[in-house]
Image: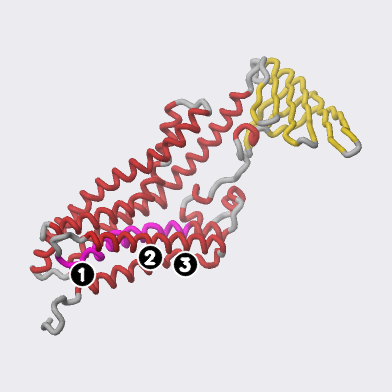
Amino acid sequence: MPRIDKYVLGLMLTLFGFFALVLVSVYWINRAVSLFDDLLNDGQTALVVLEFTALTLPLVISVVLPVAAFAATAYGTNRLAGESELVAMQAAGLSPWRLARPVLVFGLTVGLMVAVLVHGLVPMARARLADRSSEIAENVTAQFLRPGSFQYPADDVTLFIRDIASDGRLLDLFIEDARDPARQVIYTAQEALVVRTETGAVLVLLEGMAQTMTIRPTGPDLAVTRFQEFSYDIGGMFAGSSSKGRDLRDYGTLRLLNPDADLLAATGESPAAARREAHERIAQPLLSPIAAMLGFATLLIGGFSRFGVWRQVGWAILGLILIQFLSNAAVNQVGRNLALWPLLYLPAVVGTLLCMALLWLAARPRGPKGAPA
């Protein structure tokens, strides 16, 4: 690589490291604060909070890197123009297309980083985060199973346990479920067991009775049912919607491109939705070199000015907003109609054409009207 390319590439990478560190820190802290409050309110330790915030870091980095690449190229090009280095390069015979080569290499490098994140680290981190969330939900459920006191795990739900045996059996259990005003149920059981299932924690009542009072127009109606064994779902009551399946974003891209029956059963999604998620991941890294080239090409069309190129910086920001708007619109449109998944690549195509048009404008000869080129 020629020395001038190394110089420009080194400048961009240095600025990129700075902007990436700042943006990731700000974005990550904002997400970590909400996680910190939720987990501490559930009684989790600082190590659990640290683990959860670390698992969200790959997703944060994948979102921030394209923006950091744009900021690095825009600031670096402005610095080259302000110190007349860009003018000296152009006076030496380097065209805008030639000057864009190290910037393109820089953008492709950032795109490769984003690809590694979205295809590898982010799905792994999300899968681990889902598993740990399920474990935390079960631990939160266990915290409510304390003997000798009335507890209120949810609105209009009362729970009482006389004692807990050494083998984990709950002795003399009482549950009042009045969440439905028209149908109130009281469960009593001599023993109960907490069983872990795929949908969460289930309370198995043994040797008990259910008293159901139904409010009818003619008056209340009481029904008594005795049972040897009865299952009562407490996972959703204690830990929210624990019965939800896995997310498509928890799986690798290759598996999403060719979804199997196990994946579809775990997520409850269709094969078209799985492929849409895979194509969305493939299209995401393509925006990184476009963001880098956009920040560079837009600033070139302004030429040299002692007042700087801040007007071109504004146009570059508007161009980036336009590409991001197209990306969001494409995702929303494909979400409504999965057959339109090729639209996910439209922002990359539009961004490429926009960058080429800006470089072409920058390469046009400038001068007074009627002057020879």
| Quadrant including the C terminus | bottom left
Q: Is residue 282 magenta?
A: yes
Residue picked out by circle 1: 97
Q: Earlier in the sequence, mark 2 or mark 1?
A: 1
CA–CA distance in space, label 3 to label 2? 10 Å
10 with respect to 122 (left or right): left
Q: Position of residue 123 (x, y in %)?
A: 45, 47
Q: Position of residue 340 (x, y in %)?
A: 52, 67
Kind of residue at badge 3: Leu
* Magenta-highlighted residues: 278-304
Residue 343 - label: 3
Q: Secondary structure at mark 1?
A: helix
Which of disc 2 and disc 3 is earlier in sequence?
Answer: 3
- Kindly identify the residue that appears in the image at 20 percent across and 59 percent down: 77
Instruction: Name the residue tied to disc 2.
Output: 348
Looking at the rendered structure, the kind of residue marked 1 is: Trp
Residue under the image location 27 percent in, 70 percent down: 358
Query: Residue 74: which quarter of the image?
Result: bottom left
Cα distance between the residues tagged 1 and 3: 28 Å
Quadrant housing the N terminus = bottom left
Q: Nearer the viewer, residue 370 or 233?
A: 370
Along the line of sight, which residue is nearer the eye, 43 or 220? 220
Residue 41 belongs to magenta span: no
Q: Helix, strand, or loop for circle 3?
A: helix
